[in-house]
Amino acid sequence: MAKYKLKKPVAKATSFRYNGVKYVTRNVTQEQLKQLYKNGYRQVTELKEPKKPVNDGTKENDNAND
């Protein structure tokens, strides 16, 4: 699941408005940020999480003292 974040100029402000709706920066949830991002608000960025490597059960021996 991607996470969303406000850009610095807006994140440092106490509140902001978009389409006539006032948002308090501290109280904005991930769901609200997702909606703002989908509606085209340019001050919200999407952070994609890197994929975790798949462990196939084999464990590599990384001891240099062998």
Image: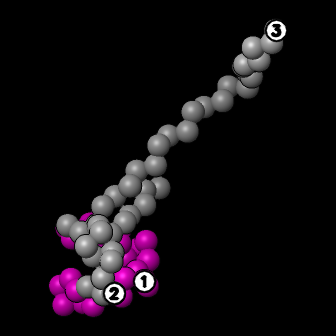
> Residue 55, which numbered label?
none
Picture residue at 50% right of the left edge, 40% below the top: 51
User: Crowdedness of circle 1 by 10 Å Cα count: few (<14), some, many (20+)?
Assistant: few
Q: Label 2 vs label 3: CA separation?
A: 58 Å
- Res. 37 in view: yes
Picture residue at 18% right of the left edge, 90% below the top: 20
Of marks 2 and 3, which one's residue comes earlier in the chain? 2
Looking at the image, is 52 positioned above or below residue 3? above
- Disc 1 target residue: 26
| Secondary structure at numbered mark 1 | helix
Q: Say whether residue 8 is magenta.
A: no
Q: Which residues are magenta?
A: 17-41
User: Crowdedness of circle 2 by 10 Å Cα count: few (<14), some, many (20+)?
Assistant: few
Looking at the image, is 14 positioned above or below residue 56? below
Q: Is residue 47 left or right of residue 13?
A: right
- Res. 35 in view: no
Of marks 2 and 1, which one's residue comes earlier in the chain? 2
Q: Say whether residue 25 is magenta.
A: yes
Of marks 3 and 1, which one's residue comes earlier in the chain? 1
Q: Position of residue 40 (x, y in %)?
A: 19, 67
Discs 3/1, front: 3
Picture residue at 37% right of the left edge, 76% below the top: 32
Q: Is residue 44 left or right of residue 20?
A: right
User: Crowdedness of circle 3 by 10 Å Cα count: few (<14), some, many (20+)?
Assistant: few
Pointer 2 with pointer 3, Cβ within 8 A: no
Q: Amino acid at mark 1?
A: Arg
- Disc 2 target residue: 14
- Disc 3 target residue: 66
Q: Amino acid at mark 3?
A: Asp
Q: Label 3 vs label 1: CA separation?
A: 54 Å
Q: Label 2 vs label 1: CA separation?
A: 7 Å
Q: Quadrant of residue 47?
A: bottom left
